[in-house]
Image (tube, helix red, strand yellow):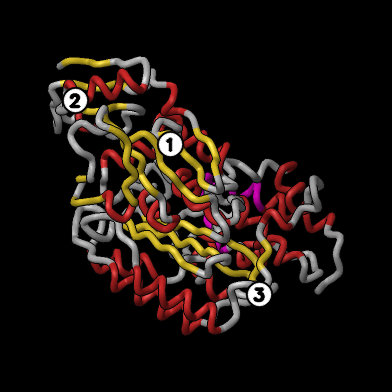
Amino acid sequence: MDFLQPASWDEALAAKAANPEALPIAGGTDVMVELNFDARRPSALLDLNRVSELAEWATENGTIRLGAGVSYTRLIDELGGRLPGLAMAARTVGSPQIRNRGTVGGNLGAASPAGDSHPPLLASGAGIEVASTRGTRVIPATDFYTGVKKNALAPDELIAAILIPSAAGPQQFSKIGTRNAMVIAVASFCISLDPRSETVGTGIGSAAPTPRRALQAERFLAGALAEAGLWQSRTGLPASVAAEFGELVKAAAAPIDDVRGTSAYRLHALWEGESLLYVLRERMGLPGSKNACEQGECGSCTVYLDDTLVCACLVAAGQVQGRTVVTVEGLASGDVLHPVQQAFVEAGAVQCGFCTPGLLIATHDLLRRGTRPADAEVREALAGNLCRCTGYEKILEAVRLAADRWPEPAS
């Protein structure tokens, strides 16, 4: 195998023209997997890591030119505010180690239907700048994907940059996987709203042979927002509009059954309401509530919903609109721990910490009733909270200590 290592963009284009079969490699997060598992044996590798032009980005007339070699980590750190949808997707890519190496250009080159960057690029109306020794052209993202892991590049072309309009309004990205991190998407979706032009953009991933938009859904939602006067308002979206939008997006998908999920699951996962737990952790950056069972058996995700103790994993996000949620983060006053939190620290009841947030909320709920509970009452009140360290005696000690210090009258 030949290993080609150009030092400039011109050299890279010349090398690709002379060796059209050469496989480009930048971060290697896709290519090396194929090589490691002997799924691919190209005659040559074209290493683009030394081409500094690919690692640059710039802004011109509201459009960001993102070099194909800019890493996901830099994208998140440097462009998260301007490209929120793409930055959200980048945060779901692998691990920090992979994000330090992986690039949007590499994701495009692989053209996998499950690629995390594809839905935001489609929803944003991005263009893919490609080049060869013959010249440069821009391919709309909608035309770039031509089949499963196939793209519109000519044999002598390389991806130079991605041209993405800066976000003019809200953008959101959601990814369903078989675990919370280091996972290939079972299904993903991105939506982009542009209040200036009153248009909606969408992108569906891992639910069709290629990433695709939901054009009918876009037109429907844009019209519904205009009709209801919601483009310049933060008023909630009518449930009927949200439901119809979901059905139209579902109709645009064409998923298959594979090892990561069934087509029926993909259709369901894309459009049904996310759990309150997922929204707290992944959307709002509140990681205190833990994700352990997702079926209400461990209590690690316990929060207050309108002053009532609930498992956040069993509450649909849509059910929370207009209601009050208090998580473990809300018990403290700034940097000052609540007496319940302080008691758990002093009694050594924190242990591994995974179950602790749910136990803290449940203990707070018990003690705010205003009487010092007997041990039997404590056990009953905490029966829905599982401690994997089996350190229940320390937890009982912490509850007793917190009860002695309880500052609030019964509510």
Within-10-Å neighbours for mark 1: few <14, some 14–19, many 20+:
few
Work out which quarter of the rendered image holds the C terminus and state it: bottom right
Left or right of residue 367: residue 27: left
The mark lying in front, picked from 3 and 2, is 2
Q: Earlier in the sequence, mark 3 or mark 2?
A: 2
What segment is highlighted magenta in the picture? 383-395
Q: Amino acid at mark 3?
A: Arg
Q: Is residue 282 above or below residue 324?
A: above
Q: Look at mark 3 in the image and give the residue it sits on.
A: 323
Is 80 in the magenta?
no
Residue 247 rendering spot, x and y as whole percentages = 35, 77
Q: Is residue 284 above or below residue 152?
A: below
Q: Earlier in the sequence, mark 2 or mark 1?
A: 2
Within-10-Å neighbours for mark 3: few <14, some 14–19, many 20+:
few
Q: CA distance from mark 1 to mark 3?
A: 34 Å
Q: Look at mark 1 in the image and give the residue it sits on.
A: 95
Residue at (82%, 72%) from the top-left corner? 410
- The foreground one among 390 and 106 is 106
Q: Is residue 45 above or below residue 103?
A: above
Q: Earlier in the sequence, mark 1 or mark 3?
A: 1
Q: Amino acid at mark 1?
A: Ser
Work out which quarter of the rendered image holds the N terminus and state it: top left
CB under 8 Å between discs 2 and 1: no
- The foreground one among 283 and 66 is 66
Q: Main structural element of the magenta stretch: helix, strand or loop?
A: loop
SS assignment at label 3: loop
Residue 266 rendering spot, x and y as whole percentages = 29, 64
SS assignment at label 1: loop
